[in-house]
């Protein structure tokens, strides 16, 4: 069985008990080096994840008879590796264990409900900002190419009245959460999630 486990927003305190139990019972842990480094006492085999997901899928299918746990940041099905693996692995060979996403974590920290939220990502694609800004409440998982500054510039270009909540390094000791108007957003932030709010909210 291939199990994809959501690791939560980062700090191990936010990892679910079922995730912890499944990891402890695994024969093989698969994950990015940073994730694997969080399990120095794991006595099974480890397999380092890289950007070549096609190669990973071949390896997983060849090892489907083993108890393999794939570590995924946040929640695997919120712009994570879970979608790709769910599409490519037979349902009888895999299970996906949800985790607390960085988006959920940020909304809880600022005390804002997630009702009627539009959730999107800028990872590896050009967002449709005209469509995004039709929504009053948006959460965007960002990347290095399109982050808070680029989002703020798109808002300013359209003359819209929006506020941005920028959550950096969420759940880690150096976490910072900023509530800013677009003209206050600086060019660089650490790993982050951005919430875009219409002033009507």
Image (tube, rainbow, N blue to C red):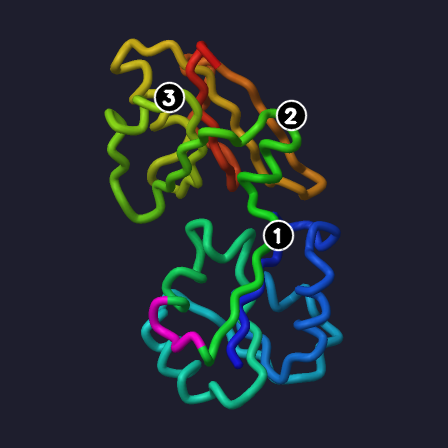
Q: Is residue 65 left or right of residue 128?
A: right
**Residue annotated with mark 1:** 8
Where residue 23 sits in the image (x, y, percent)?
Answer: 67, 72
Q: CA distance from mark 3 to mark 2?
A: 22 Å
Name the dominant secondary structure of the magenta segment.
Answer: helix
Disc 3 crowd rating (10 Å Cα; few below 14, some 14-19, many 20+) is many
Q: Residue at x 29, y 9 (%)?
A: 159
Q: CA distance from mark 1 to mark 3?
A: 27 Å
Instruction: Please state the extent of the stretch shown in magenta in the rendering.
Output: 87-91
In the displayed structure, 18 sits above or below 60; it is above
Foreground residue among 34 and 57: 57
In the displayed structure, 158 sits above or below 74; it is above
Which disc number belongs to residue 152?
A: 3
Q: Secondary structure at mark 3?
A: helix
In the displayed structure, 4 sits above or below 78; it is below
Mark 3 or mark 2, whichever is nearer to me: 2
């Amino acid at each position: 069985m291939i199990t994809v486990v959501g690791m939560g927003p980062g700090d191990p305190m936010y990892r679910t008990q079922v995730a912890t139990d499944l990891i402890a019972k695994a024969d093989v842990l698969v994950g990015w080096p940073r994730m694997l480094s969080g399990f120095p006492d794991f006595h099974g085999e480890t397999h380092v994840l890289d950007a070549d997901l096609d190669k990973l899928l071949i390896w997983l299918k060849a090892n489907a008879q083993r108890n393999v746990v794939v570590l995924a940041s946040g929640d695997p099905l919120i712009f994570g590796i879970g979608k790709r693996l769910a599409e490519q692995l037979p349902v009888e060979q895999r299970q996906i264990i949800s985790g607390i996403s960085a988006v959920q974590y940020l909304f809880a920290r600022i005390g804002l409900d997630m009702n009627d939220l539009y959730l999107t990502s800028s990872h590896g694609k050009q967002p449709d900002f005209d469509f995004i800004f039709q929504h009053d409440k948006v959460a965007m998982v960002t990347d290095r190419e399109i982050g808070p500054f680029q989002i703020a510039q798109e808002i300013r270009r359209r003359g819209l009245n929006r506020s941005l909540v920028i959550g950096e390094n969420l759940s880690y000791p150096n976490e910072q959460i900023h509530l800013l108007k677009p003209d206050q957003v600086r060019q660089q932030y650490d790993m982050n999630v951005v919430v875009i709010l219409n002033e009507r909210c």
